[in-house]
Every structure is written in C-alpha cells, then in structure tokens.
Amino acid sequence: MLDWTKQTNDPNNREARERVRQALLARRHIYTDRDLVDYVLERVAGKRVLDIGIVSHTLDYVAEEGWRHGRIVKRAAYCLGLDILREEIAKLKADGYNVRVADATSDEDLGERFDVVFIGDVIEHVDNPCRLLKFAARHLSPGGVILVTTPNPFSRKFFRQFKRDGTMVNNLDHVAWITPSMALELGRRAGLELRAYHLAKRMPSNPLLRVFRKLTRGFAPPEYPFPDYLYEYAVDE
C-alpha cells in the first residue's frame, strides 16, 4: 500500500505529492468502448456480490430498465442488496429481492462474505467514508474487491454546470467529492489498497463525431469527458 506518511509528515511535501501523482497515473484505466455500469456488470458476473445503497433514494427507479441493482442481480451468481430505507427495502423484499436493512457505516457483521462489494454512488453521501470502506472490507472473501463509484467533479458535465450557474449545486444529499488522491488516502486510513481507478464512457459511433472527440481531447485532461470514477480497493496484505 502506498503510504505517503512513511516519507514525510507534511501532506504538502513536493516529493510525496509527486510520488502520489505518479502512482495514481499508473493505476488509472480508461475505456471508451463501454459505460461504467457495463464495466461493473463484467466484474460481478458469476460472483457473490454485496450491493450497498440499492434504492437510489426512491423506488421510482426500480421499474426502469436501467435500475442498477436489478441488472447486477441478473449477472451475479448471488447478490445481497443493502439500504437504510426500511419501507423501500420491505417492498423490494415483498417483490422477491434478496435485500436487508443495514447501516453500511456501522460495526455490524452480516455473517456472509462476498467476492465483490459494490458501493454505487454512496460514498459521497455518508458522514464517515472510512467506516463505509471498513464495513465493505469486513465482508470480503479472500481475494475479493471493493468497487466504489462516485461523481468526477472535474468532468465536462460539472464544469458546464458550474460555468452556467456560477456556483455548484448538485445532489442536495452530497457531502463530499472523492477525487483520486482522496480515494487513495481514504483507503490508507481504512487499511485498504487502492488497486486501480477506472473511467469508462461509450464514445459516439458516428465516425466524424469520434474524430472530433479525439481532436478535442487533446485540449483537455484525459479524465475530463468522464462523469464518474470507479475506485477499486483490495485488503492490504
């Protein structure tokens, strides 16, 4: 695990920051032939999966074809879904879903272990993201991974909104942005290794538009077109 504190006690130390930057670049993976959800579905296929934060605030999304938990359930060998919303979980359980009410920032042990713990757009909502990661780590099988998706605050999507509105008003339940260096530090504090981080977005099929996108990417940082990050953690051995 990369631990900058073994090099210095100054978080602004130039050499330590450069070492972290190089480490993050080495861990970055970019895909332009799939969406981030497609990548997640590839990783959970045939696995035992714990899906944290499945309701997405309301049950309005459940009937939609793109409801993420529904898609994960279809691909995983076994899937348990968690959320803190009791009424919504009761309705999902009545509909036959394997779900439980649980606070994923608590010390609770569910009594099950999983190949993949998926935390989809939850970490930016919780008061203590380290406790969330520790909860996930507690439920990993040996060799398992934690996949965490969260918005990319440096993306084209948010830059355009900021430029238009003059200040950023996003999801009113968000309490943080989790950038790659912050994800690395959260992992260190939780005893986890940030193994990689992923950006994925299916680029246009129109050849002319694809050429235009390639040309314009030369004037923007590589992470700019991607609205979300996916951080991949493993238990530090």
Image (cartoon, rainbow, N blue to C red):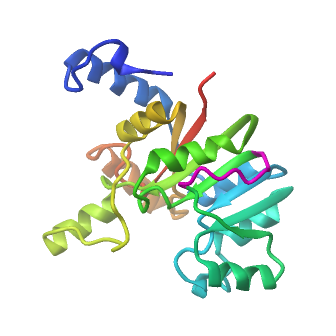
Residue located 58% across and 62% down the image: 103
Q: Is residue 31 visible?
A: no
Where in the figure is residue 110, as x and y percent of width and height?
Answer: 73, 54
* Vertical order, 160 against 128 (above or below): below
* Residue 146 appears in the figure: yes
Q: Position of residue 207 (x, y in %)?
A: 50, 59
The count of marks equals 0
Between 172 and 162, the one nearer to me in the picture: 172
In the displayed orientation, state which residue is furthest to the top.
7
Residue that appears at 67% across and 59% down: 51
**Which of these two is toward me, 237 or 168?**
237
**x 81%, y 49%: residue:** 47
Left/right of residue 178 with respect to residue 139 in the rendered view: left
Q: Residue furthest front?
A: 107
Q: Is residue 225 above or below residue 188?
A: below
Residue 113: in magenta span: yes
The answer to which image quadrant residue 75 occupies is bottom right
Please tell me whether the stretch drawn in magenta is mainly helix, strand or loop. Answer: loop
User: Is residue 139 shown left or right of residue 103?
Assistant: right
Q: Which residue does the image show at 64% across and 84% down from the upper left?
A: 87
Q: Which residues are magenta?
A: 105-114
Where residue 216 sits in the image (x, y, percent)?
Answer: 31, 51
Asked if residue 101 lies left or right of residue 179, the reply is right
Q: Is residue 77 magenta?
A: no
Q: Quadrant of the C terminus?
A: top right
Task: Return the x and y of residue 187 as percentages of the image width and height.
Answer: 48, 35
Q: Is residue 113 above or below residue 38?
A: above
